[in-house]
Amino acid sequence: MNSVTSRILSVAVLASMLSLGCETYNAPPEPVLVQPEGGVFGPGDSLFVRFSEEIDADSLAISLWGDVRDIELEIPDDADPFVDACRNGETCDGVTITVLENRRRARIDFDPDGLGAAGPPLILDINPGLADKDGNDTGRNVYFDFQFQDKSRINTVDLEFQDGVYIMVGSVNEPLPAVLTLISDMKTLKDGTFVMSGAEGDPVSPEFADNTAVPEQLLVDDGNLAWTAHVAGFVKVEDDGTRRVETDPTLIQLPLGPLTLKLVDLRLFGVVVKNEEGNDRIEGTLSFSKIILDSNGRETEYAAGAAAVAGEWVAPNRRPQGHPVICEDECGIVDDRGLGFCEPPAVWPPEGFCEAYEEFGNAQ
C-alpha cells in the first residue's frame, strides 16, 4: 500500500475522532474549489470557491502560482507568484476576485488572453487569515490545483509523441498530503488518439521519497492491494505546436483491504513539454467528480477535487519490470497470482486501436 491509501485511512479515522471529541470547537471556514462540469476549465472560465460558512470578505486574499512545488510538495521560498495577495474587489494582473452576496462563495475572473488562457497547470493559494464573521481564521495556506484547457479534439497535423513507459506521479495536498504513482504504458496514433494502461508503483525502499519518479527507485506493486488503471484520451496539437493532453472520464478503484476507494470520473488534463534530456514530459492536473469510500457496500462520499500530476518518459533499459503493456498484457504482474485489482473495460483497448497501431505505427 502506498502513501495515498494510508493517509486517506488516517483522514477517515481523524474525522471520526474529531466528530466525537470536539463538539465545542469553532472551526474556521474551509474553502473548496468548485469543479466545473466535465472536469474542464475552458479558457477564461471563472473559478468559484465555496466556503463552509459565511466569511469576513475583507479576510480573503489569494495568490496564483505556476506548478512550482519541490520534492516535499511545498512551494519554495524563492518562487515568485503570478499574482500575490489579491483581495476582494481588486483586479491583479487581469485577475479579479469578488466575494458574492451571501459571503459563502467567491468568484475569480481571469483575462482569457492572460492567466486565463489555455496553458500549464496553476495553483490557487487561499492565503492564511481567511476568517469567519467571529474572527476564527485558518492560519494556513490552502492550495488547489487547476488548469485551463482547450476542449476540442481535432488535429490538422500529425502528432509527434514519444510512446512507451511513463511514470505518472500525482500529488494531493488536501485534506492531507498524499502521492499517487502509476507506471504506465502509453501508445498513440498520429491523429492524437492514445490509450494508457498502468499499475501502481511503490518505492523499493523507505529511504526514497514517496513522490520519486526515478525508475530505479520504483517497483510495480503485485501484492493483494495492488491496482491498475486503463485510460483513453486525446493529444491536441495547437497551431503554435503546443501539445495538450486530455483523457476520457474513468473510474479508478483502489483496494484497501476490506475497503475500496473509488475515484469517480477521473480525468487528466495537461501539456506535453520537453525535459532537459529532450524527452517528452507530461505536466497537468487530475480531476475527479467525487471520491467514494466503500466499506462492504456502505459508501461515504467526498467532494470533487483536483491534484497536480507529472509524467516522465522512461528509457527502455530503465523501465521497472512487470508493468502493463498495451495490446499485449493489460495487467502486467498485477493479478498474476490472483491478487490485486485489474479489471480493464470490457472492450480494451478501444475497438480498432491495436489494428490501427500495428498498421500505421505510433505518433513518433
Image (cartoon, rainbow, N blue to C red):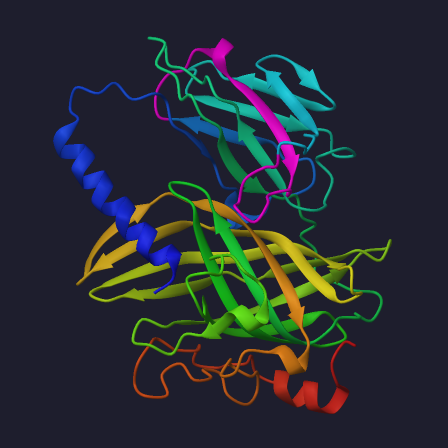
Residue 54 on the magenta span: yes
Q: Nearer the viewer, residue 12 or 276?
A: 276
Asked whether, in this view, residue 1 is left or right of residue 122, the answer is left
Q: Residue at x 52, y 42 (%)?
A: 36
**Residue 285 in the image, given as x and y percentages of width and height:** 57, 51
Q: Nearer the viewer, residue 331 or 216?
A: 216
Q: Which residues are magenta?
A: 52-76
Asked whether, in this view, residue 342 is left or right of residue 122, the answer is left
**Residue 197 in the image, given as x and y percentages of width and height:** 53, 75
Name the quarter where the N terminus is drawn.
bottom left
Name the quarter where the C terminus is drawn.
bottom right
Q: Residue at x 57, y 23 (%)?
A: 62
Kindly indicate the quadrant of the structure image that contains residue 261: bottom left
In the depicted structure, whether residue 116 falls above or below residue 279 = above
Residue 279 on the magenta span: no
**Residue 218 in the image, given as x and y percentages of width and height:** 50, 70
Give the overall secondary structure of the magenta segment. Answer: loop
**Residue 240 in the image, given as x and y percentages of width and height:** 87, 53
Q: Residue at x 23, y 41 (%)?
A: 14
Asked whether, in this view, residue 167 is left or right of residue 260, the answer is right
Residue 231 visible from this viewpoint: no
In the depicted structure, whether residue 318 falls above or below residue 256 = below
Residue 48 visible from this viewpoint: yes
In the depicted structure, whether residue 228 falls above or below residue 268 = below
Q: Residue at x 33, y 45 (%)?
A: 302
